């Protein structure tokens, strides 16, 4: 059992906290999927036993991805510590989660309060406790990761949440892990982190999700559509609406993070993770309507070059084709998404927006600009 240690400023604090979601609200877990495919063998790989109990540190963990990942890790019997600034509750009971499951989870989770930008504190606190595995869910820059590596010279595995946004825009799709990357991308810090991990010679794995969706999503992905559908408004979609994109459910992403733990085939490897189907912008709007039980939506297409929205975004996706292959993850890890798009959107709607909870209030100001110009021009 976890020990309670009094929290003092700039001192290490571990305490049992009052959250477990049994099989993600009814969706069965498949952590032992087997596939008869040719595996991609990593050279010079390290081996970490996934069957043994590990002391695992999650950088972040109180929002979205970490909420689901931490539950899976605790369910597998690992000792899990969340490193956060302590500004948000460390645990929260999830929609559909029983009181007993929540109590069981929250009694086992540990918390280390601190600022990851305080490098001296990171080094001293992590080295004092020692961890076998680190999941870095919220790291953005390489200089945020280096103190963690310095503090844990005997670290068995560092698992990093990168982004498919690092790929250089291309006419040849889907993006594969071997594709060219964009050093000027807004995710360049994640690229630099991957380079740092490679240069340090540690046992690392990097996961590159495309667009992530699901309950508790703090990015306005499906929520953007749900707000408009609920209000009975037309849905403005840039250009032709046939731009192809890709979404992956957060629970599938959490399972992928579990798949790489202690997996020697994942050593020093990058994996795209998302759904295995692609969808057009128009198709996504219709899928959201179907998931929430709304009528077929009215879709309004517009030319983004005709408008100046200032700093506001008129649409939650980049206006281009953007999708990635997950075949490597399937072949090497045995990863298989459990949610198809409509099922996943339904799960998100029923466990979040449909219950009246969402992260951002509806803002139709850019919609009104688009619709207003359209009415004038008719």
Image: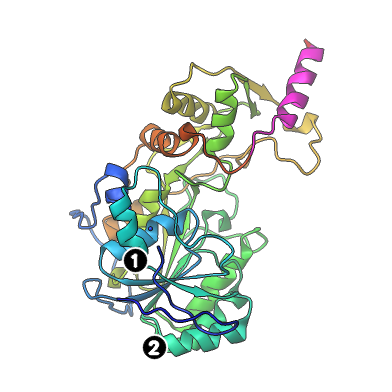
Q: Using the image as rendered, state which of residue 240 and residue 286 is in the foreground.
A: 286
In this view of the protein, can residue 72 be seen by the observer?
A: no
The quarter of the picture where residue 189 lies is bottom right
Task: From the top left corner, tell me how far across and down residue 37 is, in percent.
Answer: 21, 55
- Residue 107, numbered label: 1
**Is residue 352 positioned above or below 365 on the image?**
below
Q: Residues within 10 Å of mark 2 (few under 14, many from 20)?
A: some
In this view of the protein, can residue 140 be seen by the observer?
A: yes
Tell me the SS state at disc 2.
loop
Q: In this figure, which residue is indicated by the disc labeled 2?
A: 154
**Is residue 31 positioned above or below 294 on the image?**
below
Residue drawn at x 39%, y 55% is 68
Mark 2 or 1, nearer chain start: 1
Dominant secondary structure (helix, strand or loop) of the stretch shown in magenta: helix
Residue drawn at x 48%, y 51% is 175
- Residue 268, numbered label: none
Q: Residues within 10 Å of mark 1 (few under 14, many from 20)?
A: some
Which quadrant holds the N terminus? Answer: bottom left
């Amino acid at each position: 059992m976890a020990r309670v240690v009094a929290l003092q400023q700039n001192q290490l604090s571990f305490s049992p906290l009052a959250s477990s979601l049994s099989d993600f609200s009814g969706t069965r877990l498949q952590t032992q999927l087997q596939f008869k495919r040719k595996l991609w063998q990593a050279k010079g790989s390290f081996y970490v036993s996934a069957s043994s109990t590990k002391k695992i540190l999650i950088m972040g963990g109180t929002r979205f991805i970490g909420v689901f990942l931490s539950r899976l890790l605790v369910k597998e019997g690992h000792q899990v510590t969340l490193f956060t600034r302590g500004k948000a509750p460390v645990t929260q009971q999830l929609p559909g989660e029983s009181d007993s499951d929540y109590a069981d989870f929250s009694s086992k989770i540990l918390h280390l309060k601190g600022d990851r930008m305080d490098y001296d504190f990171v080094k001293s606190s992590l080295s004092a406790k020692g961890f076998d595995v680190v999941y870095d869910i919220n790291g953005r820059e390489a200089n945020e990761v280096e103190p963690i590596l310095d503090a844990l010279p005997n670290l068995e595995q560092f698992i990093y949440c990168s982004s498919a946004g690092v790929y250089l825009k291309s006419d040849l799709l889907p993006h594969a892990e071997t594709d060219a990357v964009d050093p000027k991308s807004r995710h360049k810090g994640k690229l630099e982190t991957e380079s740092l991990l490679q240069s340090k010679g540690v046992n690392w794995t990097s996961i590159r999700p495309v667009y992530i969706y699901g309950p508790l999503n703090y990015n306005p992905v499906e929520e953007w559509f749900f707000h408009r559908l609920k209000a009975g408004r037309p849905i403005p979609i840039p250009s032709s609406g046939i731009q192809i994109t890709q979404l992956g459910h957060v629970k599938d992403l959490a399972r992928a993070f579990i798949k790489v733990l202690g997996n020697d085939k994942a050593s020093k490897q990058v994996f795209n993770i998302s759904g295995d189907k692609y969808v057009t912008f128009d198709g996504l709007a219709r899928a959201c309507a179907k998931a929430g039980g709304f009528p077929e939506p009215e879709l309004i297409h517009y030319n983004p070059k005709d408008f100046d929205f200032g700093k506001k975004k008129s649409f939650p996706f980049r206006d281009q084709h953007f999708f990635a292959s997950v075949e490597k993850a399937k072949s090497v890890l045995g990863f298989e998404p459990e949610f198809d798009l409509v099922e996943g959107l339904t799960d998100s709607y029923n466990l979040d927006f449909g219950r009246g909870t969402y992260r951002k209030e509806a803002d139709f100001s850019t919609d009104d600009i688009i619709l207003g110009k359209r009415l004038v021009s008719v």
